[in-house]
Image (tube, rainbow, N blue to C red):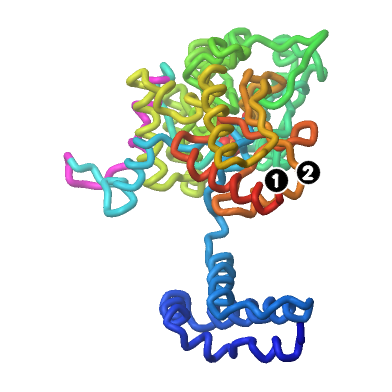
Amino acid sequence: MDASSELRKLPKIDRLLDSDEAGRWVEREGRELVLGSLRLAVDEARLDVQQGLACPSEEAILARTRELLDLQTRPTLRPVINATGVVIHTNLGRAPLSEDALAAMARVARGYSNLEFDLLQGERGSRYAHCASLLAKLSGAEAALVVNNNAAAVMLALAALARGREAIVSRGQLVEIGGGFRIPDVMRESGASLVEVGTTNRTYARDFEAAITERTAALMVVHRSNFQMVGFTCDAGLDELAALSVARGLVLIDDLGSGTFLDTAPFGLAHEPTVQERVAAGADLVCFSGDKLLGGPQAGYLVGKRALIERLESFPLLRALRVDKATLAGIEATLRHYQRGEALSKVPVWRAISLGVDAAQARARAWMERLGQGGAHRDLQVVASESTVGGGSLPGLSLPTRVLSVGVKAPDEVARALRLGEPAVVGRIEEGRLVLDPRTVLPHEDDALIHAVQKVLTQHGVS
Ligand SMILES: *Cc1c(COP(=O)(O)O)cnc(C)c1O
């Protein structure tokens, strides 16, 4: 092919910009962005021609411009289909929300609300009143408070109750949660001094007792959310610490991490301590996340003694940790699912945890059939595998599942193409095969998943 005569066929930018299509894009996105995308598309076409290919048509260049424009204008934060089988995936936004929670958030966010207005009295109200009684009732606690996340809850509790004084904690519980978040660092930021007791593997109530001085304000317990300690180990019992803190006039703070109202044991997992159990065992304040096993919006919950919650409510730092109205609406709707006893069927995190092997098998099979249609000779199998709960809960444990396993020549490239697609899909690579786990793919995402995988497999020449 004669490259120079082909090069002359490249359309001029001005001409492309004058097209009806480009005119519509300019109206929406502005001239600057459209011009930039047109230049990129024409540059790509020029490279093609220099490689000896025919000059693409004007329509093809405009179609490519459209793609480039979409890439530049799509939101940086966007939906991802989670086919990893990790239910609470911190990097993928933790808990997806229930339909009721979403509807409640949209209703409150769209207009004005009684966020800080008492409709009965017609005067100023408190944002902290929302969700508090529901949360307290579900926990069996006297009172409750909602803040931005669990790190904020721990920080607030220590700052308000132990700043300038001492908080005693076991050496076996000085954990790093992830993202560089270390419990001892947060405790220090609160202005409380940390007193470590016991050893890495064994700490007794008497170690706490021996460390109490007139400067001690709190005893602190931290749940080992993301690792297991096995062998010759011992923790001080929460009931023993509760008795000790009552006897010595101290506050017992329990950082439960991924708090749950439901028992995880019926799903073949270990028993994760529930919020109700910890309150009943005598913790003065229990702190936990709203978007781990609770399955709601990002939040931190504090439940416990009324007098302590009241001190937190009047502590100035609270202002910096407060939650938005939409979040509060989402929390209330999520908590209602627990109150009504419908969390297993309505809260996506619990729907995923309670998904049985048969249901996983049926879904993986349906995906396999759809991807194998149209005479495509693909290497598709439904095989047994394991999902995990993730998100700093139930370390080392897994849920049996069935996955769709796809044989591909270059798994890393296929995984990358899936991540960069629209919508993005994140799966697992196991033994050189692409693995898609139905446990974490939401019911309404099936079509989009099949479409995205279909496209990438075709592009990568997998039939
Ligand atoms: C996850 C976790 C936190 C932090 O909770 P966020 O809601 O992410 O701030 C704190 N402590 C423990 C034990 C945790 O597992």
Q: Which residue is at 51% across, 86% downward?
A: 17
- Reply yes or no: does residue 204 show up in magenta: no
Label placed on residue 409:
2
In front here: 163 or 321?
321
Residue 281: x and y in percent read 53, 10
Residue at point 46% right, 34% down?
Answer: 443
**Residue beneath the point at 45% across and 76% down:** 25
SS for tag 1?
Answer: loop
Spatial separation of the CA atoms under disc 2 and disc 1: 8 Å
Residues at circles 2 and 1 in contact by the CB criterion of under 8 Å: yes
Q: Give coordinates of residue 370: x percent, y percent.
A: 53, 37
Q: Report the residue at 28% width, 54% height from top.
A: 111
The answer to whether one can see residue 235 in this image is yes
Image position of 120 with respect to 364: above or below: below
Check disc 1 and report the residue beneath it. Answer: 462
Q: Please state which of residues 431 and 130 is positioned toward the viewer in this rendering.
A: 431
Q: What are the residue bounds of the magenta stretch?
A: 120-138
Dot 2 or dot 1, earlier in sequence: 2
Q: Is residue 88 above or below residue 452?
A: above
Q: Amino acid at mark 1?
A: Val
Q: Mark 1: few, some, or many residues within 10 Å (few <14, many ≥20)?
A: some
Amino acid at the residue labelled 2: Lys
When asked about the image quadrant of residue 314, the answer is: top left
Q: Is residue 381 above or below residue 229?
A: below
Front-most of 343 and 426? 426
